[in-house]
Image (tube, rainbow, N blue to C red):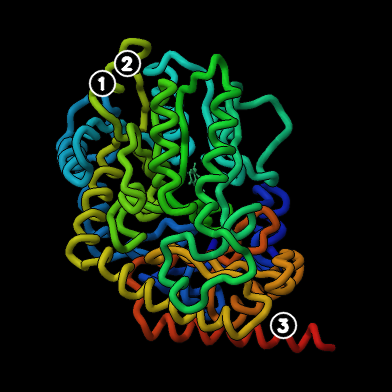
Amino acid sequence: KYQSLAYNHILEIHKKHLSPVATAFFQKPLLLHQGHMEWLFDSEGNRYLDFFSGIVTVGVGHCHPKVNAAAQKQLSRLWHTSSVFFHPPMHTYAEQLSALLPEPLKVIFLVNSGSEANDLAMQMARAHSNNTDIISFRGAYHGCSPYTLGMTNVMAYKTGLSSGMGCRSTMCPDVFRGPWGGSYCRDSPAQTIRKCSCVPDCCQAKEQYIEQFKDTLNTSVAKSVAGFFAEPIQGVNGIVQYPKGFLKEAFKLVRERGGVCIADEVQTGFGRLGSHFWGFQTHDVMPDIVTMAKGIGNGFPMAAVVTTPEIARSLAKRLLHFNTFGGNPLACAIGSAVLEVIEEEKLQENCQEVGTYMLLKLAKLRDEFDIVGDVRGKGLMIGIEMVQDKMSRQPLPPQEVSQIHEDCKNMGLIVGRGGIFSQTFRIAPPMCITKPEVDFAVEVFRSALIQHMERRAK
Ligand code: PMP
């Protein structure tokens, strides 16, 4: 019955019974019927190259045969039992995942979503430090639950209802849109083509942002802090990279005040950044807690919090953490298959090679078009920030960005959007994409930009 529902009927059902989020993404939402690796197919059989992978989630590819086979095998064996029982998929997975994390990050709590993982990490930080204040960046996205919403500093998600007591925001060290810096104090291959000349004193940027960070810490409750959450590269905020060395210094300052440091690897983990398996490794820092979701299950709902035995004990003194679905056999079997595929298919290496190739191609587009203000990122987590012109860096108005987004889709390319003004295109495809597919995507993007310039000229 579902297969035969007409587009307009689906739209009607959606408007009546479902969340409006889908109708906010594309002007005409896509009705998808099938996915295979980096490809998606709509109800009319049109094919799309998925360069957003269901919001940075389907890391190893849609319906990957090995992941599907593992899920089917587990489905016919045992697909639910709460984590109060032992079952081999959970224990196998715990060993596999912990082997990928450095000492002393060895204790795993399995949950179902990124918001849940960050909720739990907040509780751990407070239980361990005996402090209250949680610091996160302006522009950060850490979840939509009442707890995590306090750390999510993106206007579209702020409800105005009371949430996130004790959460404090601090200035995001965004060297493109913030008051200090230029594009080149970051670690991104796209910098190699053009060094930003419009903003002087780039190298001072880190120090200036650190002063802001200290100011936030010094005005916290009794100058103490429970935890500091940071994404190694911000996703929802439009692939924002911090100045080199910022996180290292920030972690030190937080620890001096008794707080713990949390890396939110929901988007950056599992090899996506290419050079390293975890985003925190690209900053040469060691977090006390790591949260992960999205790519961990290739789209199957699962998430995890990994911490030290010491922090796990601090939590256990306060509460017995329980989660009905967390660590269920099906999720764990899928999680194991995902880790195996990443290794067998050398997907981290592919992110590095194909991601760098794409960044360099996109950097050429940036130099060609005045409305492409910045190209940044690492591996297969890339941002293209759209501006009215390079000199002013004023964001391109949302309706213009939306039209370019729609035009890309109509030419068979799906990308995401992000940033405070929704001004940045986000590229985070399944990690298996190839260079010819990048060539196709860049050409689609170029055509969309040309169409846009022609519209503007009229
Ligand atoms: N952290 C980050 C960095 C995210 O991008 C997201 C989701 N966009 C979350 C946490 C929340 O994850 P979930 O939607 O699974 O609750």
Comparing 391 with 267, the one in front is 391
Report which residue position mark 2 lands on: 314
Comparing 241 with 449, the one in front is 241
Comparing 263 with 436, the one in front is 263
Q: Determine the residue positioned at 54% across, 59% down.
A: 202
Left or right: where 124 falls relative to 409: left
Left or right: where 181 falls relative to 70: right
Q: Amino acid at mark 2?
A: Ser
Left or right: where 234 falls relative to 454: left
Marks 1/2 in contact by CB < 8 Å: the verdict is yes
Residue 76: tell me if it is visible.
Answer: no
- Position of residue 109 relative to residue 299, above or below, is above
| Disc 1: CA contacts within 10 A as few (<14), some (14-19) or many (>=20) | some
- Position of residue 284 relative to residue 94, above or below, is below
Instruction: Give me the C-alpha separation between circle 3 and circle 1.
Output: 55 Å
Q: Earlier in the sequence, mark 3 or mark 2?
A: 2
Q: In the rendered structure, find residue 310 and report the number of the disc placed on it.
A: 1
Q: Earlier in the sequence, mark 3 or mark 1?
A: 1
Q: Determine the residue positioned at 35% across, 47% down.
A: 280
Marks 3/1 in contact by CB < 8 Å: the verdict is no
Q: Report helix, strand or loop for mark 2.
A: helix
